Amino acid sequence: ADAEKGKVVIGSKLFQESFILAHMAGIMLEEEGYEVDVQQGLGGTLINYEGLKQGTVDVYVEYTGTAYSQILKEPPLEVWDPEVVYQKSEEGLNADGVVIVADLGFEDAYALAVKKDWGEENNVSDISDLEEYASELIIGTDPEFANREDGLPRINELYGLEFKAVKPTVANIMYEAIKNDEVDVVSAYTTDTRNELFDLRILNDDKNALPPYDAIIVMSAEFADANPDAVAALEKLEGQIDTDTMRGLNYQFDVEKRDAEDIARDYLIESGLIE
Ligand code: PBE
């Protein structure tokens, strides 16, 4: 790497997609001559975001609905327009010294999911349909969903649900738990192919509790101002990953057990973004 460009620290959250995308950003910056430090699995949303504000993290991949609800604490909307959520998120982040460098081109939303068989037997296809069963069901969540503004508290309030128990854990274990029938409902991620592989049924959010979650690359404004080349390098990822592509990359990690950096590099080569 070209020493003059300096160092860049890339944060990531605690799930495969975040690892892969952090490496993707890292490789683009390495190509540009930066010395790159990818912190794979650095922590949850607020660890990454605080790092960005304090300068210990320069870049990471966030999601619009998460910025809007969990970071900026904006109120829920009656109708969730992805454009509006993007605009409001951008304004709020900018005011906080953070810029959006690229919109990657896909959404990874939260969704409640149950086992397909159970859903069929009990006629449960909307979140509303859980009402008569919730008191007997255990919900497994990722580490954030159980307490997030845009997570279980809002779902419970809006749908009048009270689950028998809530078990938060990392996404990977959450998926294993529903596969093994240790939990009955999970806070699934819509780009995770285990939704199909483990025969899950995604429930329709019929009361619009959850916001849209478009994947965006965020950077500290201070770092962006000092490093226009880094901004330009990451802007090349704008619109480069659609939902099916992201699912395929996650599949390579979860099922084919490939290394996140290899997955990222191969994708960038295949799509002509690097040589
Ligand atoms: N999500 C869904 C969460 C995790 C899965 C991508 C919106 C987030 O990181 O905010």
Image: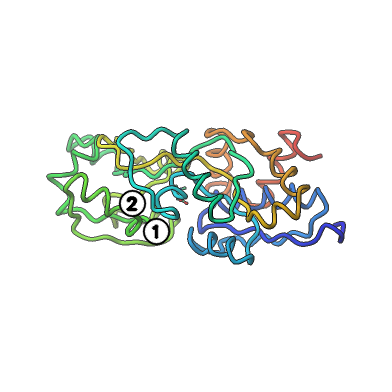
Measured as percent of width and height from the top left, residue 163 is found at 20, 55
Which residue position holds label 2?
Answer: 151
Which residue position holds label 1?
Answer: 144
Nearer the observer, 251 or 150? 150
Measured as percent of width and height from the top left, residue 206 is found at 26, 34
**CB of mark 1 near ligand 1 (< 8 Å):** yes
Q: Amino acid at mark 2?
A: Gly
Residue beneath the point at 75% across and 37% down: 273
Residue beneath the point at 65% across and 58% down: 58
Nearer the observer, 264 or 230? 230
Q: CA distance from mark 2 to mark 1?
A: 8 Å
Identify the image quadrant of the C terminus: top right
Circle 1 residues within 10 Å: few <14, some 14–19, many ≥20: many
**In the figure, residue 130 lies in which quadrant?**
top left
Measured as percent of width and height from the top left, residue 248 is found at 56, 38
Q: Amino acid at mark 1?
A: Glu
Identify the image quadrant of the N terminus: bottom right
**How are the colours assigned in the image?**
rainbow
State if disc 1 and disc 2 touch (CB < 8 Å).
Answer: yes
Query: Which residue extends farthest front?
Result: 95
Q: What is the tally of numbered marks visible in this picture?
A: 2
Tag 1 or tag 2, which sits nearer the N-term?
Answer: 1
Residue beneath the point at 56% across and 33% down: 242
Nearer the observer, 191 or 195? 191
Provide the secondary structure element on which disc 1 rests.
loop
Measured as percent of width and height from the top left, residue 238 is found at 64, 36
Can residue 259 be seen in this snapshot? no
Can residue 173 be seen in this snapshot? yes
Circle 2 residues within 10 Å: few <14, some 14–19, many ≥20: many
